[in-house]
Amino acid sequence: MSKSVQITCGTCSGEVVVKKFSWHHTTVQWNAATLSSCTELGAPSTEAHDIAAMRSCPRLREAINVAAVEGRFGNLD
């Protein structure tokens, strides 16, 4: 089972709590401080109810991927 890991974005220093259940299943919890420090996470969505588009940051996603490859979430196979 995966454990929760705090991930820090190397660009804006925003911090989120991430839990990965597999290579393709990831949950991310963010807070107001992260939203205010990351221009990508705080960018408004162009779709009326598109929460996923509003909460996407390619640099943060890359930090999560690096942590997964490094084994910080445990065994994801």
Image: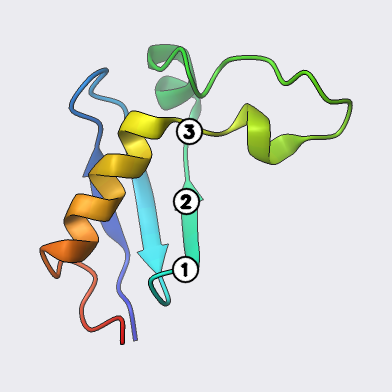
Residue 11 x %, y %: 22, 20
The residue labelled by disc 3 is 31
Q: Which residue is mark 2?
A: 28
Q: Nearer the viewer, residue 13 or 70?
A: 70
Task: Single out the mark in the foreground, 1 or 3.
Answer: 1
Image quadrant of residue 13? top left
User: Which secondary structure lies at badge 2?
Assistant: strand
Task: Write the residue at 47% across / 38% down.
Answer: 30
The residue wearing badge 1 is 24
Q: Residues within 10 Å of mark 3 (few under 14, many from 20)?
A: few
Number of numbered markers: 3
Amino acid on which disc 3 is placed: Asn
Where residue 55 appears, x then y in whole percent? 58, 33
Label 1 neighbourhood size at 10 Å, few (<14), some (14-19), many (20+)?
few
Residue 15 placed where, x, y %? 30, 35
Query: Cα distance, mark 1 to mark 2?
Result: 13 Å
Question: Where 9 sits versus 45, above or below?
Answer: below
